Image: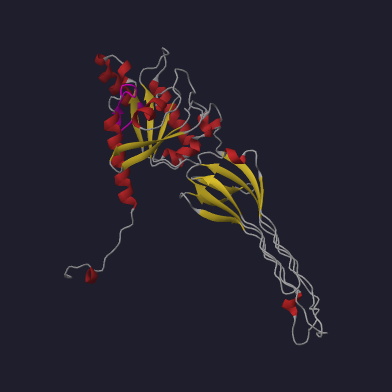
């Protein structure tokens, strides 16, 4: 299935049905009075977050979504039927913004969440609504109210706890394969990953987190170079970034430090908030570095990169150091979750302990 994480749609709720002008005509009732019913309301447009979906491809070639209008009112006190509602299924993590103003209108973050994104118009009043003691034969009615009309931009941001960041061929896809259930395409050429991949990392019983692998970044990505800039938005919801660095580049003369600094610069240029997220350094492909040179090369990299955070030395291919990495990531996410929980002040009179 083609991965689509951005789409534009037009949604139109149903118009309300018009009210009816009618009078009762029965034998022996010369002046039966008004009996025109109200029109039915127009159909609403709903959106539901479907966890079975992971792309917006269904909206790429189906842009217009219109609910049915309400039925007009009829005589004999009969109200019009309401128009049928329609429900649009979107992936969890879909952001809906106004296509013209760019304002964020809705965020679908919870599986099964259902919201009304366009309200159907109310039905118009029939003439039976206007009867009174001085107006016994009203001929007034009102048309139905129009339904909401919106042009929306749908943007999918995958929901992951950890994001993998790095140059093309840094080993991100190999790492997500080694530690999770994801099976992305892996090859020995750049830009193998063409769309984000999600994987669930199992640390232990009922202990897991979700990791996202996005296409690699290159210098100038924030200005549109390469592929990674198209998918940096998917890292904005993560809690932790793992900066994967290739410590054994194939091309002679390639400096891993310069590449790593270029990635950080592009990240800061794209979104300062994304740059400010916790970011750990993961030095990959150390199995391809001579054992006698490994320690020296790692120390030289950290010194020149001027990095003071956690550093992990791994080989995604041989799984060396991967267990230590995922356990540290899980403990960090768990501590972050605990810190974000609101504290509840307990009145000592109800705490079960005598007040001091």
Residue furthest right in the image: 30
Q: Is residue 183 above or below residue 91?
A: above
Q: Nearer the viewer, residue 313 or 267?
A: 313
Q: Which residues are magenta?
A: 305-318
Give left or right: position of 61 versus 158.
right
The prevailing secondary structure element of the residues shown in magenta is loop
* Residue that appears at 29% across and 46% down: 335
Task: Indicate whether residue 276 is drawn in magenta.
Answer: no
Q: Is residue 139 above or below residue 13?
A: below
Give left or right: position of 184 versus 137.
left
Residue furthest front in the image: 27
Task: Indicate whether residue 309 is drawn in magenta.
Answer: yes
Q: Is residue 41 above or below residue 341?
A: below
Q: Position of residue 309 (x, y in %)?
A: 31, 34
* Residue that appears at 62% across and 57% down: 44
Name which quarter of the figure residue 161 lies in. top left
Quadrant holding the C terminus: bottom left
Q: Nearer the viewer, residue 270 or 127?
A: 127
Q: Nearer the viewer, residue 129 or 255?
A: 129
Whether residue 306 can be seen here: no
Q: Is residue 259 above or below residue 128?
A: above
Whether residue 161 can be seen here: yes
Q: Position of residue 350 (x, y in %)?
A: 24, 70
Name which quarter of the figure residue 202 lies in. top left
Q: Position of residue 278 (x, y in %)?
A: 36, 39
Q: Nearer the viewer, residue 76 or 275?
A: 76
Give left or right: position of 272 versus 130.
left
Quadrant holding the N terminus: top right
């Amino acid at each position: 299935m083609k991965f689509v994480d951005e789409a534009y749609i037009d949604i139109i709720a149903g118009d309300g049905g018009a009210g009816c002008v009618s009078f009762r005509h029965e034998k022996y009732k010369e002046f039966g009075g008004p009996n025109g019913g109200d029109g039915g309301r127009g159909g609403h447009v709903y959106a539901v977050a479907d966890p079975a979906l992971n792309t917006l491809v269904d909206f790429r070639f189906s842009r217009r979504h219109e609910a049915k209008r309400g039925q007009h009112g009829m005589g004999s006190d009969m109200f019009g039927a309401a128009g049928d509602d329609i429900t649009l299924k979107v992936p969890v993590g879909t952001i809906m913004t106004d296509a013209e103003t760019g304002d964020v209108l809705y965020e679908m973050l919870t599986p099964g969440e259902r919201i009304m994104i366009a309200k159907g118009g109310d039905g118009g009043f029939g003439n039976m609504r206007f009867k009174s003691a001085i107006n016994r034969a009203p001929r007034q009615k009102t048309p139905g109210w129009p339904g909401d009309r919106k042009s929306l931009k749908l943007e999918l941001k995958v929901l992951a706890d950890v994001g993998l960041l790095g140059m093309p061929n840094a080993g991100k896809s190999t790492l997500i394969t080694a530690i999770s259930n994801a099976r992305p395409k892996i090859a020995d050429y750049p830009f193998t990953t063409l769309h984000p991949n999600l994987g669930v990392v199992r640390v232990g019983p009922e202990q897991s987190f979700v990791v996202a692998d996005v296409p690699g970044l290159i210098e100038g990505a924030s200005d549109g170079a390469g592929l990674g800039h198209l998918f940096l938005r998917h890292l904005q919801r993560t809690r932790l970034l793992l900066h994967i660095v290739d410590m054994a580049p194939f091309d002679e003369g390639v400096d891993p430090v310069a590449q790593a600094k270029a990635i950080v610069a592009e990240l800061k240029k794209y979104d300062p908030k994304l740059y400010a997220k916790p970011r750990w350094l993961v030095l990959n492909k150390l199995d391809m570095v001579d054992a006698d040179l490994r320690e020296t090369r790692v120390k030289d990299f950290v010194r020149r990169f001027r990095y003071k955070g956690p550093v992990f030395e791994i080989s995604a291919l041989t799984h060396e150091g991967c267990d230590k990495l995922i356990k540290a990531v899980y403990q960090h996410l768990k501590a972050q979750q605990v810190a974000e929980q609101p504290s509840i002040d307990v009145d000592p009179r109800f705490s079960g302990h005598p007040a001091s």
